[in-house]
Image (cartoon, grey):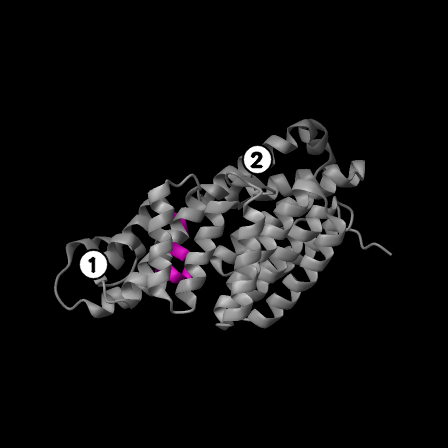
Amino acid sequence: MRRALPPSTTPFGGSTSPTRHRHTLKDLPCELAELNEHRHRTELSAVLQKLPGVLADATNCAHATQSPDAWTRVADAYSVVYWLAARHRWMHLAELAVMKQRLAAERAHPIAATVAARDEAGAFLNSGDFAGGLAIVDRAVVEAETTLRGRDRAYGLGILHLRGLTLAGRLKEKATAERHIEAAWQVAEEFPEDIVDHGIHFGPENTAVHVISTASDMEDYRESLNTADDLVRGGLTLPATRVGPLHMNISRSKLALGDRGGALESLEAAWDVAPEMARVHPTSQELMRVLTSLHRRSNPRLTRLAKRAGVPF
């Protein structure tokens, strides 16, 4: 028996409004697209402000129409809740979001279940249960291979393998990471350039961004920087939500190789492109902590950045 999402509440509190739904039903796709634009620009405060209303509208629409399109929008809205909660390390909210996302996906198009599994594995990643996250990815890959067709199949498998290679990198399981990397690159060949569906990017550039991060996780810092050089030289089209973490991981590899100046430069780039994300991202926070602890002499650039981050220095 299907479990229903309560029509009267949102995870942010308050109630949904059928009256509001009648006036905004036609605007839902635009509202969700605008919300994801804020997400892609890493405007966390704007996402937080607008997300409850969009989620309420989407939920009301789904209960009114019971259409797979509408329930897919609900699942996509909860994916944004997960993203925002994960950025802030609000882990209880992140876990609630992926649970609600799975429930909505039961009534949505099949791709929604794949995105939900990707986000659920992300919640495991954020909490440090990398093996548990990999198990979710493995099950979701099998399901996606049998339930999805065409572009949805390629896209769904792609985002799952990106999550898989990240989890394997955190576990330092080289063979598993390479398996997911190879599969991700193979799927990425079906996309001449990166696309964004359901608020998530996939394609050659975002695959490279994930490979760079995983190489750093596995302490292959030179390979990480070489891949980053190739990516940046080719020109980036990805938004701030992907470019910010890219610069953080470049900074991480440079710092590991003893290039403090280069690490600071890349961290500054991350702050320039995605300041709201850099303020709360654990990689950015750790880089700031290490750089400030290593510098004993006055460094105006580091002092300015530390002030932006709210770090005493």
Judged left or right of residue 11, residue 262 is left
* Residue 192, x across and y down, in percent: 52, 38
Task: Give the residue type that dot 2 points to.
Answer: Ala
- Check if residue 280 falls in the magenta segment: yes
* Residue 114, x across and y down, in percent: 67, 52
Write down the quadrant of residue 76 in the picture.
top right
Q: Relative to the observer, which residue lies in front, 232 or 99? A: 232
Q: Answer few, some or many: residues within 10 Å of disc 1's Cα (few below 14, many 20 plus, some between 14 and 19).
A: some
Q: Which residues are magenta?
A: 276-284
Q: For numbered disc 2, what is the local secondary structure?
A: helix
Judged left or right of residue 56, residue 219 is left
Judged left or right of residue 243, residue 175 is right
Evaluate whether residue 12 shows in this view.
Answer: no
Residue receiving disc 2: 33
Quadrant of image for the C terminus: bottom left
* Residue 118, x across and y down, in percent: 61, 56
Judged left or right of residue 108, residue 174 is left
Q: Answer few, some or many: residues within 10 Å of disc 2's Cα (few below 14, many 20 plus, some between 14 and 19).
A: few
- Check if residue 81 falls in the magenta segment: no
Quadrant of image for the N terminus: bottom right
Q: Is residue 148 above or below residue 119?
A: above
Evaluate whether residue 57 shows in this view.
Answer: yes
Tell me what residue is drawn at x 44 percent, y 42 percent. 238
Ranked by sequence position, the earlier of labels 2 and 1 is: 2
Tell me what residue is drawn at x 56 percent, y 70 percent. 130
Q: Relative to the observer, which residue lies in front, 260 or 231? A: 231
Residue receiving disc 1: 261
